[in-house]
């Protein structure tokens, strides 16, 4: 992704001050990220209608607590917001924050529909704020190194990318909450955990998606409305073919890679912490990486992008196209056909189908 300067936005001259919207489970990882980056970012406010949750997240930094994020947007001294709400609440929070002149870091998914995506694209074009998608796995060192090898042409023309994110999820009817209902989750596992291998696939493919086809299943979590497993095929506009396997029903087999890329000159593959690549006729090269706090890296990147006025690694345009793959996958599975992907028109700020 490029690092072009934004045309209009307010650049803070102090550490970026952020208001957290939503103090639930994932917000804890974000708070740790703020604590690891106090030189560039400050968690200044927390908004959640559950006072105990808000106070717990705020206690680490002394942030001001609000019961309603709209009040926080009007009153708090903040430059940006970090949205950690249930999926169906993302669009409204993004639009409200943008209209208040605040930059946005939003947990996945960006939103739930083409209509919501169009509203977000329009408000970003209107206000000039930056919206960054919280795609934390892009900050794994193995992913960054793989992307560099691809972009440097080490593999030549890329033919195929595969990504996997599957695990045995211990959800029950009692603890699954809003994720069990497609109206609030947006679907099932694919739009939740499956969002990770989808954005990773698009990042490594280095192109916009054109069409997708999918098969969905509910192997084990029969109490949820949506799928607990999915397999998706994607065609990109640079000719790359991609495949995604994702599930809450099972652990993958021991020989399953987190991601792999095959090109004209060779291939690479990774379990997420070690990266191997091999060119045709040469020995395999292995690189091992120390573990990193993906959320700390993500938050540092967001803050420095806002401060410098540069484009973050994934904006709302990327988030729209990741969502587009997932919506096309759902359409494909429902109609038993290949479906066109919703795409962001990056020059006009509009949306289109491939």
Image (cartoon, rainbow, N blue to C red):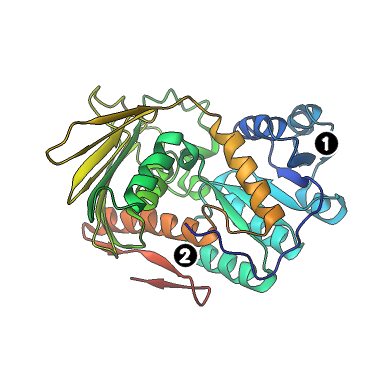
Out of 42 and 147, give the one closest to the viewer: 147
**Which is more N-terminal, label 1 or label 2?**
1
- Asked if residue 83 is positioned above or below residue 6 in the image, the reply reads above
Q: Name the residue under label 1.
A: 63
Q: In which quarter of the image is residue 94?
A: bottom right
- Looking at this view, name the residue that lies furthest to the left: 281
- Looking at this view, name the residue that lies furthest to the front: 282
Q: Is mark 1 on a helix, strand or loop?
A: loop
Mark 2 is surrounded, within 10 Å at the Cα level, by few (under 14), some (14 to 19) or many (20 or more) other residues, namely some
Residue depth check, mark 2 versus mark 1: number of the one nearer the observer: 1
Q: What residue lies at 58% left-to-right and 68% top-to-bottom? A: 119
Q: What numbered label is drawn on residue 236?
A: none
Q: What residue lies at 43% left-to-right and 42% top-to-bottom? A: 144
Gap in angstroms between the C-alphas marked 2 and 1: 35 Å
Q: What residue lies at 23% left-to-right and 62% top-to-bottom? A: 239
Q: What residue lies at 47% left-to-right and 58% top-to-bottom? A: 318
Q: What element carries label 2?
A: helix
Q: Quadrant of residue 23?
A: top right
| Side (left or right) of 297 relative to 95 | left
Q: Position of residue 146 (x, y in %)?
A: 36, 42
Q: What numbered label is drawn on residue 114?
A: 2
Task: Tell me whether the residue at label 2 lies in contact with that at label 1, contact meaning CB atoms closer than 8 angstroms.
Answer: no
Which quadrant is the C terminus positioned in?
Answer: bottom left
Q: Quadrant of residue 190?
A: top left
Q: Position of residue 68 (x, y in %)?
A: 78, 47
Q: Where is residue 108 in the image (x, y as percent from the top left)?
A: 52, 46
Mark 1 is surrounded, within 10 Å at the Cα level, by few (under 14), some (14 to 19) or many (20 or more) other residues, namely many
| Residue 350 seen anywhere in this rendered image of the structure | yes
Q: Where is residue 215 in the image (x, y as percent from the top left)?
A: 24, 47
């Amino acid at each position: 992704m490029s690092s072009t300067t934004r045309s209009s936005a307010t650049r803070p001259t102090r550490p970026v001050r952020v208001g957290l919207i939503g103090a639930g489970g994932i917000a804890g990882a974000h708070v740790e990220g703020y604590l690891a980056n106090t030189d560039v970012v400050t968690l200044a406010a927390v908004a959640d209608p559950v006072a105990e949750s808000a106070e717990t997240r705020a206690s680490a930094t002394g942030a001001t607590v609000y019961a309603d994020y709209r009040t926080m947007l009007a009153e708090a001294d903040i430059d940006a917001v970090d949205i950690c709400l249930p999926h169906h609440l993302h669009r409204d929070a993004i639009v409200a924050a943008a209209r208040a002149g605040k930059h946005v870091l939003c947990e996945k998914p960006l939103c739930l529909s083409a209509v919501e995506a169009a509203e977000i694209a329009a408000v970003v074009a209107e206000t000039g704020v930056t919206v960054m998608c919280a795609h934390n796995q892009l900050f794994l060192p193995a992913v960054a190194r793989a992307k560099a090898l691809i972009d440097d042409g080490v593999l030549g023309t890329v033919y195929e990318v595969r990504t996997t994110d599957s695990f045995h999820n211990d959800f029950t009817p009692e603890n699954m909450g809003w994720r069990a209902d497609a109206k609030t989750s947006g679907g099932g596992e694919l739009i939740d955990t499956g969002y990770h291998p989808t954005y990773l696939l698009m990042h490594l493919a280095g192109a916009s998606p054109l069409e997708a086809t999918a098969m969905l299943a509910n192997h084990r979590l029969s109490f949820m409305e949506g799928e607990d497993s999915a397999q998706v095929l994607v065609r990109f506009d640079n000719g790359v073919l991609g495949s995604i396997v994702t599930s809450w029903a099972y652990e993958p087999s021991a020989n399953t890679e987190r991601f792999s890329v095959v090109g004209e000159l060779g291939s690479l593959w990774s379990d997420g912490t070690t990266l191997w690549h091999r060119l045709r006729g040469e020995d395999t090269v292995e690189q091992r990486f120390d573990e990193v706090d993906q959320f700390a890296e993500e938050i540092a990147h967001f803050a420095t992008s806002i401060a410098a006025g540069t484009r973050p690694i994934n904006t709302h345009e990327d988030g729209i196209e990741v969502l587009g793959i997932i919506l096309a996958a759902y359409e494909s599975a429902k109609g038993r056909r290949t479906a066109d992907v919703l795409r962001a028109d990056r020059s006009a700020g509009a949306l289109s189908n491939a």
